[in-house]
Amino acid sequence: MNSPPPPPEVAAAYAALATQARLLDLRDLIFAAAEATDTGPLTETLKWGQPSFLPAKKAGTTLRLGEDASAPTLFVPCSTNLLDRYRAAFPSEFTYSGARAVHLPAEGPFPDAAFQQIAAMALTYHRDKRR
């Protein structure tokens, strides 16, 4: 999938991060998840200075990409149960902290399919709650 170019302020935020290459790969996977779940188009903006993705159809919740201790990290709202669901579905693929952070490997092999699935779970969070 070809993701649209990020808005200039978001591109600048990526450029300032040590793990920019991995985060841009994750960005592509988030856009692919939005397409696969019919929750797009996504609005890409900055929240708390971090690249953030908001589904247009209000089917899901916001995803943010950033770094925590120089590791690429996906952040979700702590008011959701997403981290519990992620831990249950992918107990060894990622490292988790608290109710909001998924720590991802900066280099080496990456579980693309698992990451796309956790992105899809966030992008469909509200839609799935209504079922």
Image (cartoon, rainbow, N blue to C red):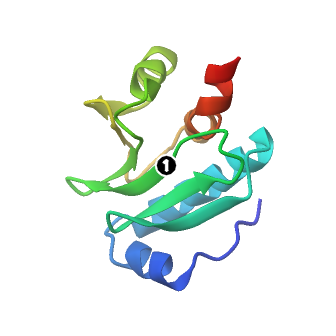
Please identify the quadrant where the C terminus is shown.
Answer: top right
Residue at the bottom extreme? 8
SS state under label 1: strand
Residue sitting at x 42%, y 68%:
20
Which quadrant of the figure has residue 54? Answer: bottom right
Residue 74, how many percent across, how many down?
A: 41, 46
Residue sitting at x 67%, y 21%:
130
Q: Is 118 on the left-hand or right-hand side of 50?
A: right
Callout 1: 10 Å neighbours few (<14), some, many (20+)?
many
Q: Which residue is mark 1?
A: 63
Q: Is 12 on the left-hand or right-hand side of 120?
A: left
Residue 96, how many percent across, how many down?
A: 32, 31
Taking the image as drawn, is residue 38 in sight? yes
Between 9 and 11, the residue placed more toward the observer is 9
Amino acid carrying mark 1 in the image: Leu
Taking the image as drawn, is residue 114 in sight? no
